[in-house]
C-alpha cells in the first residue's frame, strides 16, 4: 500500500496519472528531462526531480536514473505510462529488485507478451483466435521457410519476434521473394530489437484493427472492458480511435473478450492491458498484447464509466476490484482524435512556442492535454500534444460532437493536424464506419494526387 508514486513519463499521460493518484490520496513525484523543465504538469506534482538531459536515452529511457529518483524521494511505486520503458521487462525487474512496486504486470508477463512468438503460443493455449501460422520462430534454412509459406498460402508476412511499432515486417507475395525477404527482415529485427528471430503468418489483405481492453487485479479478477476500433492509421500509427467498434456482432465481441480475460488468468496478469486483433470476414485474429495503458484508453473510460488508470493503481496496491464483469456495460459511443504538432499535409513535426489555446467545451467533450499558452513544445519527443475525446448517445451523435469540438479547438503559434482531423470526420468512408487499416493511407494518397 504505497502512498507516494513516481511517474516515469511526460506530457498528457503524466498529468492523467497525477489526477488518478490524487483521487486515491497518493502523492506524486514527476521526473523530467532538462528539455521538459518548464512543462506545466510539473507544477501540479507534489515533487519533481530532473533525471537527465533532453535526449530520451539519457532521461526517460534511463531505468537506473528513474529508480534512483524514486528511492531518493521515498516513492514506493513507479507508473511507466505508455511508450518509453512501459513494456520493458528489465525496467520492471530493476524496480522489483529495488523493493519498489511497478504499476503494471510482472516482468515475466511482459517478456511473454513482448515476444510475439511466445505471446502467440500463450494465446493459442488460452483459446484466443490467432492468425494462421506456426507458433514458433522460423528456422535458419530458407528452403524450410519457403515450405512453411507454401503451406500457409500466399501472401504471407514476416515479422520480428521482438518487434512492434510497424518495424521489422515484410509482406511476401510469391515463393521467389522469400529468401531476400527473410534476410532483410532478420537484419531489421536485429537492428531495431536486438533479436534476429522472426516468424511468419498469413497476410490479411483488408483487415480492421480491433482491440479488447482488459484490467486485472491480483485476486483473480480479470475484466474485459469492451472493444475499440483503431483502423484509422498512417504508417501503422493510430490517428483516430473509437469505442465500440462499429458493425461487429456484440455476441462475438463478448466471446473474444471472455477468452482474453481467461488468457490473463492463465498467465497471472495484473494491471491494464490490450489485446490487439486483426478482424476480417467476421473473424478475429490475435496479433499482439500491449502490457500497459493505451493512448486511446479514454474512449473506453467514457463508454464504461470506469477509470482505467485508477484501477491500475488499485491493482498495484494489491486491492481487489469492487467491479465485476457483470457490472461492465457499454453506453453510447466515444471517438478520440490525436492532436499532433505537425503539418496536416506533409506530417513534418512542428515544435515551437504555443501562443494561444482555445479548448472546446460542452456536454460529452473531454480534452486530455498538458499544453497552455507560453509552453514551448520540445523537439526531442513524440509530436502528440493533446487528445480530444467525445462521447455521444450513439455513433452519429459522437461524430457530430467531434465535428463541433474540432471546429472550436484552436492552438496558436504552431501547426497542428486539427484541420486533417476535421476533414476526416466528414470523410464518407469513416463516417459510415467499418473501414480497414489501409483506408486512411489510400485517402491521403488520393488527396495528395488531387
Image (cartoon, rainbow, N blue to C red):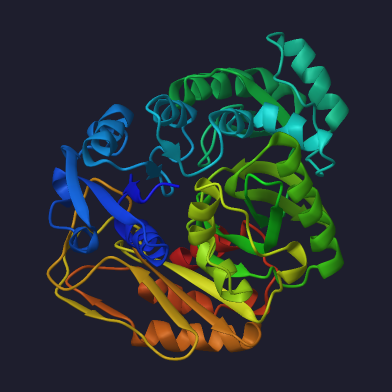
Residue 179 vs 281, above or below: the answer is above
The quadrant in which residue 175 appears is top right
Residue 167 position within the rendered picture, expressed as x and y whole percent measured from the top left: 51, 36
**Left or right: 219 in relation to 87:** right
Residue at 47% in and 90% down: 363
The quarter holding residue 172 reads: top right
Direction top: furthest residue:
141
Q: Horizontal placement of 50 versus 361: left or right?
A: left
Q: Is residue 156 visible?
A: no
Extreme residue toward the front, this view: 1
Q: At x 75% / y 32%, what residue is drawn?
A: 122
Position of 306 relative to 126 (above/below): below
- The spot of residue 303 in percent (x, y) is 62, 75
The quadrant in which residue 366 appears is bottom left
Q: Position of residue 50 (x, y in %)?
A: 16, 42
Q: Residue at x 13, y 44 (%)?
A: 34
Residue visible at 66% across and 17% down in the picture: 179
| 235 and 332: which is toward the camera | 332
Q: Nearer the viewer, residue 314 or 353?
A: 314
Give x and y (percent) for residue 387: 41, 68
In-front residue for pair 81/425: 81
Q: How many marks?
A: 0
Residue 274 in view (yes/no): yes
283 relative to 157 in the view: left or right: right
Q: Nearer the viewer, residue 57 or 106?
A: 106
Above or below, 435 against 313 in this view is: below
Left or right of 328 in this view: 215: left
Amino acid at each position: 500500500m504505497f502512498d507516494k508514486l513516481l511517474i516515469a513519463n511526460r506530457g498528457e499521460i503524466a498529468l492523467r496519472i497525477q489526477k488518478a493518484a490524487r483521487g486515491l490520496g497518493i502523492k506524486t513525484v514527476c521526473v523530467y528531462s532538462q528539455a521538459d523543465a518548464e512543462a506545466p504538469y510539473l507544477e501540479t506534482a507534489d515533487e519533481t526531480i530532473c533525471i537527465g538531459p533532453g535526449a530520451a536515452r539519457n532521461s526517460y529511457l534511463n531505468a537506473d536514473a528513474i529508480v534512483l529518483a524514486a528511492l531518493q524521494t521515498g516513492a514506493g511505486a513507479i507508473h511507466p505510462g505508455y511508450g518509453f520503458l512501459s513494456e520493458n521487462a528489465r525496467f520492471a525487474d530493476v524496480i522489483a529488485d529495488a523493493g519498489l512496486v511497478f504499476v503494471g504486470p510482472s516482468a515475466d508477463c511482459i517478456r511473454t507478451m513482448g515476444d510475439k512468438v511466445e505471446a502467440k503460443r500463450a494465446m493459442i493455449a488460452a483459446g484466443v483466435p490467432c492468425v494462421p501460422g506456426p507458433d514458433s520462430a522460423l528456422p535458419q534454412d530458407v528452403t524450410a521457410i519457403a515450405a512453411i509459406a507454401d503451406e500457409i498460402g500466399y501472401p504471407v508476412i514476416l515479422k520480428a519476434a521482438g518487434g512492434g511499432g510497424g518495424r521489422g515486417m515484410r509482406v511476401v507475395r510469391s515463393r521467389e521473394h522469400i529468401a531476400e525477404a527473410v534476410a532483410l527482415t532478420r537484419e531489421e529485427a536485429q537492428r531495431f530489437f536486438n533479436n534476429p528471430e522472426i516468424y511468419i503468418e498469413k497476410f490479411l489483405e483488408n483487415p480492421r484493427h480491433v482491440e479488447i481492453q482488459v484490467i486485472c487485479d491480483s485476486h483473480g479478477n480479470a475484466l474485459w472492458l469492451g472493444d475499440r476500433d483503431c483502423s484509422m492509421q498512417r504508417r501503422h500509427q493510430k490517428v483516430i480511435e473509437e469505442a465500440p467498434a462499429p458493425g461487429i456482432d456484440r455476441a462475438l465481441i463478448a466471446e473474444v473478450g471472455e477468452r482474453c480475460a481467461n488468457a490473463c488468468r492463465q498467465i497471472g496478469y495484473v494491471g491494464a492491458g490490450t489485446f490487439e486483433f486483426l478482424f476480417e470476414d467476421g473473424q478475429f485474429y490475435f496479433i499482439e498484447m500491449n502490457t500497459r495503458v493505451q493512448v486511446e484508453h479514454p474512449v473506453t473510460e467514457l463508454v464504461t464509466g470506469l477509470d482505467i488508470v485508477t484501477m491500475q493503481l488499485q491493482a498495484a496496491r494489491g486491492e481487489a476490484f469492487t467491479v465485476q464483469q457483470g457490472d461492465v456495460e457499454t453506453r453510447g459511443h466515444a471517438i478520440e482524435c490525436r492532436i499532433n504538432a505537425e503539418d496536416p499535409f506533409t506530417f513534418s513535426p512542428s515544435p515551437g512556442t504555443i501562443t494561444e489555446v482555445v479548448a472546446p467545451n460542452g456536454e460529452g467533450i473531454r480534452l486530455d492535454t498538458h499544453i497552455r499558452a507560453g509552453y514551448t513544445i520540445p523537439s526531442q519527443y513524440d509530436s502528440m500534444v493533446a487528445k480530444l475525446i467525445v462521447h455521444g448517445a450513439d455513433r452519429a451523435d459522437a461524430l457530430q460532437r467531434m465535428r463541433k469540438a474540432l471546429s472550436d479547438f484552436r492552438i496558436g503559434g504552431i501547426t497542428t493536424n486539427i484541420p486533417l482531423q476535421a476533414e476526416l470526420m466528414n470523410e464518407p468512408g469513416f463516417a459510415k464506419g467499418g473501414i480497414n487499416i489501409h483506408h486512411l493511407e489510400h485517402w491521403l494518397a488520393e488527396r495528395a494526387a488531387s
